[in-house]
């Protein structure tokens, strides 16, 4: 393995790297949590010991992300993919349209699900440019009576991200933040609903975080199955049925780790610095490495690039794997290379990859 503690240099796109100290604490508490003689996975979700973990995770999430009082924080299941369905099911009213901004595969999937419930429209798209960029504000068209505007904040497959979010006025802005939640500071008040699978920056797979403005809950459609209504989970403090208790415990521990790092601002500075190491190699390679995203739309979570010679690219990935780097293959739909530098990916891993890329170019230029 590449590191001194026998840990891989983990650049997986998700599930992805978790902080080592969080894993070690979970290991220590695995069979006897808080002196109960039980694992957190064994105890009732109605018990006081679990309820304290649950409520502390919600409170810490609200504090670290500066979430206003008029928002609910929910822990759901089904990943962002179920949110593609729940959003239009709950909020795309009959006779209304919803605007979808297409910036990659995941926003396309969200649009596809919305078509099952009403009339979504594409308000902007960068598909014609192979999803290399984020649409500019003057390219985004929506109506003031739209049910909502939906976008994906960070695009894991193409390596693009929104720097500034559109001002949608009174139209609710709904955002899939699965791959960059808690990677940088955001003004929560700009959004009516944020959803995110936890398995990139917040914990293991199995938990989906939803941050929803309370007034939006009042606009839910009727005749929706109980488990697919946001209000069901808001009214029950995300304990309507058995939640993914271990995942929520782990999420709470990751939030403590973020707090100990100096909070979201410190995490953001670190993320920019880590990604910058790799982008600098790409930019200074004189075309040996070619980034996919335009410079103004680059993601600090997913760095996508190609090597012009396809056989050399295969060799790069093979040699990187031998050197202890994991997860550098691009998504199966586009190929190429991708380094996912989520919050828990350490600086040393990004520095090691940057150095490896420089040495590989020297050998094969």
Image (cartoon, rainbow, N blue to C red):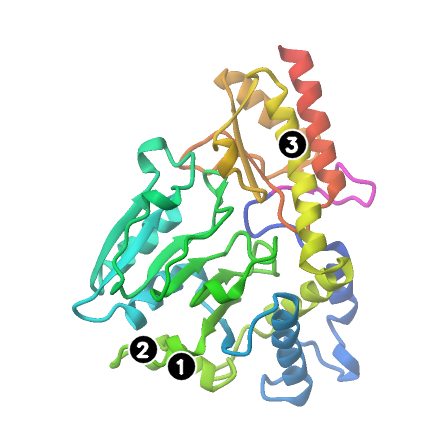
| Residue lying at 52% horizontally and 67% vertically, measured from the top left | 209
Does the magenta run of residues contain 2? yes
Cβ atoms at labels 1 and 2 below 8 Å apart: yes
What is the crowding at mark 2: few (fewer than 14 residues within 10 Å), some, or many (at least 20)? Answer: some
Residue farthest to the left, as pictured: 95
Report the residue marked by disc 1: 231
Which of the two discs, 3 and 1, labels the residue nearer the N terminus? 1
Residue 358 vertical placement versus 41 (above, below):
above
Residue 150 x, y percent position in the rendering: 36, 57
Which quarter of the figure is the C terminus placed in? Answer: top right
Residue 253 vertical placement versus 156 (above, below):
below
| Residue lying at 69% horizontally and 13% vertically, measured from the top left | 362
Residue 42 visible, this angle: no
| Residue lying at 34% horizontally and 49% vertically, measured from the top left | 101
Residue 158 x, y percent position in the rendering: 45, 38
Report the residue marked by disc 3: 278
Does the magenta run of residues contain 321? no
Dominant SS in magenta: loop
Q: CA distance from mark 2 to mark 3?
A: 44 Å
Q: Label 2's element?
A: loop
Residue farthest to the right, as pictured: 4
Is residue 194 or residue 30 the one in the foreground? 194
Q: Label 3's element?
A: helix
Cβ atoms at labels 2 and 3 below 8 Å apart: no
Report the residue marked by disc 2: 220
Query: In the image, which residues are magenta?
Result: 1-11
Residue 27 visible, this angle: yes
Which of the two discs, 1 and 2, labels the residue nearer the N terminus? 2
Residue 211 x, y percent position in the rendering: 49, 69
Looking at the rendering, which quadrant does residue 173 occupy?
Answer: bottom left
């Amino acid at each position: 393995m590449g590191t001194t503690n026998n840990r891989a240099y983990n650049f997986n796109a998700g599930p992805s790297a978790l902080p080592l100290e969080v894993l070690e604490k979970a290991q220590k508490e695995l069979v006897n949590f808080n002196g109960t003689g039980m694992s957190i996975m064994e105890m009732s979700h109605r018990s006081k010991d679990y309820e304290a973990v649950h409520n502390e995770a919600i409170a810490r999430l609200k504090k670290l992300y500066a979430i206003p009082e008029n928002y609910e924080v929910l822990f759901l299941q089904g990943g962002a993919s179920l949110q593609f369905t729940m959003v239009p099911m709950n909020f795309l009213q009959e006779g209304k349209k919803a605007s979808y901004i297409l910036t990659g595969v995941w926003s396309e999937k969200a649009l596809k699900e919305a078509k099952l419930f009403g009339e979504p429209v594409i308000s902007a798209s960068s598909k014609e440019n192979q999803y290399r960029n984020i649409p500019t504000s003057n390219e985004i068209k929506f109506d003031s009576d739209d049910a909502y505007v939906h976008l994906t904040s960070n695009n894991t497959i193409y390596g693009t991200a929104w720097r500034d979010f559109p001002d949608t006025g009174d139209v609710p802005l709904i955002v899939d933040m699965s791959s960059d939640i808690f990677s940088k500071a955001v003004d929560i008040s700009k959004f009516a609903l944020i959803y995110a699978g936890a398995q990139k920056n917040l914990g293991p797979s199995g938990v989906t975080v939803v941050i929803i403005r309370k007034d939006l809950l009042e606009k839910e459609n009727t005749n929706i199955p109980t488990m697919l209504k946001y209000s069901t989970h808001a009214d029950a403090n995300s304990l309507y049925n058995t939640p993914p208790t271990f995942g929520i415990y782990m999420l709470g521990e990751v939030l403590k780790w973020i707090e100990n790092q100096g909070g979201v601002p410190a995490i953001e500075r670190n993320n920019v610095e880590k990604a910058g190491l790799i982008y600098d190699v790409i930019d200074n390679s004189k075309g040996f490495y070619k980034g996919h995203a335009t410079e103004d739309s680059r993601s600090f979570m997913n760095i996508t690039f190609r090597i012009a010679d396809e056989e050399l690219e295969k060799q790069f990935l093979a040699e990187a794997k031998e050197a202890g780097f994991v997860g550098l293959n691009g998504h199966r739909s586009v190929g190429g290379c991708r380094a996912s530098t989520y919050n828990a990916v350490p600086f040393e891993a990004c520095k090691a990859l940057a150095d490896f890329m420089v040495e590989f170019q020297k050998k094969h230029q």
